[in-house]
Image (cartoon, rainbow, N blue to C red):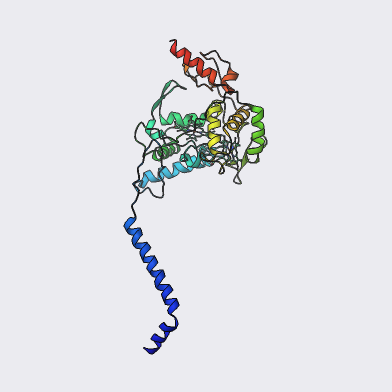
Amino acid sequence: MESVRKNIRENWPVIIIITAVILVLAMNFLSLNTTYNPTPITTTYDSSWASPSLFTDRTLTGENRTLVIYGQDLITHTSRYLGPNGKVGSISNGMNCQNCHLSGGKKTWGNNYGAVASTYPRFRDRSGSIETIYKRVSDCFERSLNGKAPDSLSKEYKAIEAYIKWVGKDVPKGVTPKQTGIYKLPYLDRAADPIKGSIVYQGQCQRCHGQNGEGVLAINETEYEYPPLWGENSYNNGAGLYRLSRFAGFVYSNMPNNEASHEHPVLSIEDSWDVAAFVNSRPRPIKNLEKDWPDISKKPIDHPFGPYTDGFSEVQHKYGPYPPILARREEMKKSK
Ligand code: HEC
Ligand code: HEC
């Protein structure tokens, strides 16, 4: 007993400090518990969209889960399965879907798949018909991957569709979440300039995508570390990125990869348009596009192939300036 008292007497400063710390911790804990008021999570599809995760989705089970997991692998490593040396087939150019649909088609403003399950089948002016998901996926195989449509009955196609539908499963029918697809950059009031764009390319892109836009193969040599931007292994002239607005918007929000984000872009709006003009003035595979845009008045303003109803040249449709074309189209609408 005596020794305990002696101990306390000798160590009282330490004891006081320890008691004080315990008290402060306890008060903090109590106040946290009483004032903790969780902000209600309101998911407004208009302003944001959160993609599902395979780690947390416990509703996805059994065969369905296996299929979605295979689909994710096909989107992120397309070329391993379906590229020039693919282990299942050889129907595409060596690019992966993920090269353009970033983070497996889940990234906001990274050309994500958020609106596919909710808005397909839908009418599209490019084909002048109602398109299913199969038709839309085939389009990217034939254009962006400069290849062939997959067999709609194959396990690979079924897995791709299951994955894309799963990514958009929480979006209500008919809704397109903001931040889906590609950001629509404001138009310049001048034509986009390939010469200025080549300087942007040298400064911001070449170190990864290569001096001739050829990209860099990964060590496994079946997919790209840095995908090609032009040349024989790139997307063809019928691909979405061949339109300047799509390319510029994609690059503005996403490139240089892992450095730029939509909230913190690296390129200015002007640089994005100019580098788009430069890259899309380089050679690339050609697709026969005769059947596209059966109603020529519906061609997008930056579709670079005539004929058009508005009287502007192919060059101006490709590079701009777009505001005069827009104005003419408005006038034509009014005078109808
Ligand atoms: C070279 C780039 C590129 C590659 C590679 C690519 N895509 Fe696309 N994809 C696009 C662009 C651009 C769009 C149109 C985006 C827009 O106009 O908003 C698109 C659109 C889509 C859409 C429609 C999205 C929507 O909301 O309407 C689907 C589905 C799709 N791609 C699937 C695929 C699949 C599957 C693959 C791989 C087999 C693939 N894509 C590879 C560029 C690419
Ligand atoms: C740090 C390396 C790096 C830099 C710098 C970079 N990119 Fe990329 N880029 C990538 C990678 C990696 C991908 C594929 C992303 C994936 O698969 O997840 C990509 C994809 C792309 C794509 C879609 C796929 C394709 O090949 O068509 C385009 C377009 C693109 N980059 C354009 C640009 C432009 C333009 C610049 C310069 C402003 C640029 N990138 C700078 C690494 C880079």
Image quarter for ligand 2 equals top right
Relative depth, front residue between 191 and 163:
191
- Between 55 and 232, the one nearer to me in the picture: 55
- Front one among 2 and 264: 2
x and y percentages locating residue 59 in the rendered image? 34, 46
Which quadrant would the C terminus be assigned to in this image? top left
Residue 252, image x and y in percent? 55, 35
Residue at 39% from the left image edge and 45% from the top image edge:
65
> As rendered, which of 336 and 227 lies closer to the eye?
336
Farthest residue, direction left: 34
Which residue does the image show at 64% across and 34% down from the upper left?
200
Q: Is residue 74 above or below residue 142?
A: below
Residue 311 seen in the current view: yes
| 210, above or below 301, in the image | below
Q: Is residue 148 visible?
A: no
Q: How many marks?
A: 0
Q: Quadrant of the N terminus?
A: bottom left
In the rendered image, which quarter is residue 120 located in? Answer: top left
Q: Residue furthest bottom?
A: 2
On the image, which quarter does residue 242 sit in?
Answer: top right
Vertical position of residue 121 compared to residue 317: above or below:
below
**Could you tell me residue 123's position as x and y percent?**
40, 24
